[in-house]
Image (tube, rainbow, N blue to C red):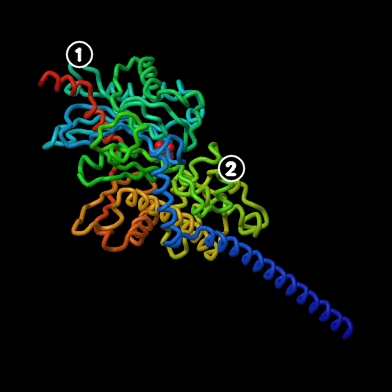
Amino acid sequence: MRKVAVGAAVVCAAAVCAAAAVVVRQRMKSSRKWARAMAIVKELDDKCGTPLGKLRQVADAMTVEMHAGLASEGGSKLKMIISYVDNLPTGDEKGLFYALDLGGTNFRVLRVKLGGREKRVVKQEFEEVSTPPELMTGTSAQLFDYIAEALAKFVATESEDLHPEPNKQRELGFTFSFPVKQTSIASGTLIRWTKGFNIEDAVGKDVVQELTKAMHRKGLDMCVTALVNDTVGTLAGGRYYHPDVIASVILGTGTNAAYVERTSAIPKWHGPLPKSGEMVINMEWGNFRSSHLPLTEYDIALDEESLNPGEQIYEKMISGMYLGEIVRRVLCKMAEEASFFGDTVPPKLKTRFVLRTPDMSAMHHDTSPDLKVVATKLKDVLGITNTSLKMRKVIVEICDIVASRAACLAAAGILGILKKLGRDTLKQGEKQKSVIALDGGLYEHYAKFRDCLEFTLKELVGDEVAETIMMEHSMDGSGIGAALLAASHSPYLQEEDEEFY
Ligand code: GLC
């Protein structure tokens, strides 16, 4: 009896020891995994580092590329496209104009009634239409027919008092936010697609002609009087309200900037330009690349697997189309190499572009004590359940690293433009204001990104110069800007002038 009891006690003790050993092993295993996961985050943080010195190098490289892009065709990754916009809105524009704003997953059609200096924008109506994803990689005719049809429907809602006079055509400002080699203010050929569009038969074609043909097919009688990039539209829209606007930056699905250059600084090969005057340049800065950019393995893999490998490297580190995807790639590595979300990799986490930047932003801005938003997004978007608070905090940290790098790099880009214009230092006795018009969903809705961008630019230029620089949100400026440019380039305006003289 005693022996049995002793035997049972020994067996029990052995079982307890074994169980304890399993627990200890598991703990060790999970602490090893946690350490591995933290090492991945630490490495990301190190590689994404953007100390001011590095940002200054990026800014300098941007200025150098601006010079090189202007100096010769193909001289730089920056196309530095002449926009043919040499007179920005003054406020005197009058009449009814349409605008079509195409550049991302949605496009917008607008109707704007301009009332001149006193009344400004008298009336403005718009509609937003989403572009079916299959049209982003279909044929040119399919895309433009779809757009022309939406435009025709919108025109049909025009009230009677706005109808044009019998012998006048309706006029349209066309914001087409892709790299286009402009041949005049109202014509230009598509250089290549960006932002997930890839319609091969449109490359090399005049996009105004493509749109005009589609409008004819849809029975719409309208004339395109201005073709502009969204940066150029935003600059024009900004200048309409603020005479000190000197540059514009789009931070949305893609990223790009435009600025006002002195024509005397533009080399002759660009063709005849007035000797003294101004010209808006569309930089296409999304394609900027420099050895100073803090690239990571995630950026390299994202680029290699993209529709446009080797292109738009700066854009792929900064813009809304890509930030969520970078975070997803980091989480994927943590799942694969550190079993961060359990023994198997959550299947949804492997889907490219499943984590969108607005979801990343929602996680990044989560202020609830238990990070409820992070938990919900992980569950709904990535199918990841049962995360601890500690894990969720790590995810917020990853969002912070990726968004801060993007914002800092954008700030460096802006400093590059200010340097090119000699506005990064104070001239003696001069306190000229430099206003930068900004727009795009990333800038508008991602508050931590916006704050970091503004803070970093201030740090880069120093307090005194910072007082002369203003960042203005130019809401939907690109559409209004296109309408304004359509107004200032209207053929009827010329007729009026001719009649007058
Ligand atoms: C992409 C386009 C560019 C556009 C920018 C912002 O970079 O190439 O033309 O301005 O996105 O929409």
Q: Which residue is mark 1?
A: 167
Looking at the rendered structure, the secondary structure element under dot 1 is: loop
Mark 2 vs mark 1, foreground winner is: 2
Q: Earlier in the sequence, mark 2 or mark 1?
A: 1
Q: Residue 237: where, in percent of width, then height?
A: 25, 39
Vertical comparison of 99 with 48: above or below = above
Q: Which residue is mark 2?
A: 304
Residue at position x 28%, y 31% in the image: 273
Q: Residues within 10 Å of mark 2 (few under 14, many from 20)?
A: few
Looking at the rendered structure, the secondary structure element under dot 2 is: helix
Q: Amino acid at mark 1?
A: Asn
Residue at position x 58%, y 52% in the image: 297
**Pick the front one: 425 or 39:** 425
Q: Is residue 99 left or right of residue 385?
A: left
* Residue 368 visible in the snapshot: yes
Q: In which of the image's four quarters is ligand 1 placed?
A: top left
